[in-house]
Image: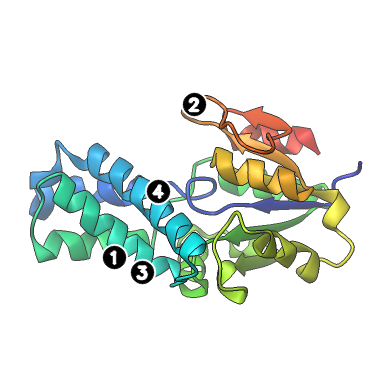
Amino acid sequence: MTITTCVFDAYGTLFDVNAAAAAAAAEPAHAHIADVWPAIARDWRAKQLEYSWLRAVAGRHCDFWQVTQDGLDWALASNGVTGVATRRRLLDLYWELAAYPEAPQVLADLRAAGMKTAILSNGSPKMLEAAVTSAGLAPLLDAVLSVEAVGVFKPAARVYDLVGEHFPGAEQSVLFVSSNGWDAAGAAGYGFQTAWVNRAGAPMDRLYATPHHTVADLTAIPGLV
């Protein structure tokens, strides 16, 4: 199968979801989270994803910004952190998450090889626009696709349908890349070729499908196509 289109998850794959908590903790005004920011970042991400799945199963969709706020509120409470200013700062920083260092060059290499590149994300359109612009990735992407077009979060098949709708005929020539094992598995079950960016060296999720490739970071992606 010849790959013509590389589609990336956004948060945790192209953008470092820990960057907001790390940046806030380095600021004097929020030094009180210097020792707990890794736990805040971990719990924030875990609840953000958990709430997206629960809303999908319950048929209670909201946009990703709402579950991002709800996840943060749980993470702050779990770690004994209070204060409106710190909450606000963490949320503000989430709109300008840093891309992983290798991301721009990987996207540029794929484009130079003639590949179409895109994002397919749970993020809302405004969130994704802000992150892509802040990281300077806009010129390297052919499309930024949000689940808001179908009103349900990944790994619902309707989300993966968006790729074929935007790139007609590309369904059989897609490499889908995600740092979330469940997302890479969901896309594999849908029918895409998939690569799981397993930065943490986590075990494989036990699901109905498995990713076709496992890589340590994004630098390996051009070699797969």
Q: Position of residue 4 (x, y in %)?
A: 85, 51
Q: Residue at x 77, y 47 (%)?
A: 192
Residue that protrudes farthest toward the front in the picture: 58
Look at mark 2 in the image and give the residue it sits on: 202
Mark drawn on residue 151: none
Whether pointer 1 and pointer 3 mark residues with C-beta atoms closer than 8 Å, the reply is: no
Whether pointer 4 and pointer 3 mark residues with C-beta atoms closer than 8 Å, the reply is: no
Q: Nearer the viewer, mark 1 or mark 2?
A: 2
Q: Nearer the viewer, mark 4 or mark 3?
A: 3
Judged left or right of residue 185, residue 6 is: right
Look at mark 3 in the image and give the residue it sits on: 66
Element under label 1? helix
Mark drawn on residue 92: 1
Compute the Cα span from label 4 to label 1. Answer: 13 Å
Q: Position of residue 9 (x, y in %)?
A: 59, 52
Task: Judge whether residue 27 can be spotted in this image.
Answer: no
Q: Label 3: how many residues lie within 10 Å, few (<14), some (14-19) or many (20+)?
A: some
Compute the Cα span from label 2 to label 3. Answer: 28 Å
Q: Quadrant of the C terminus?
A: top right
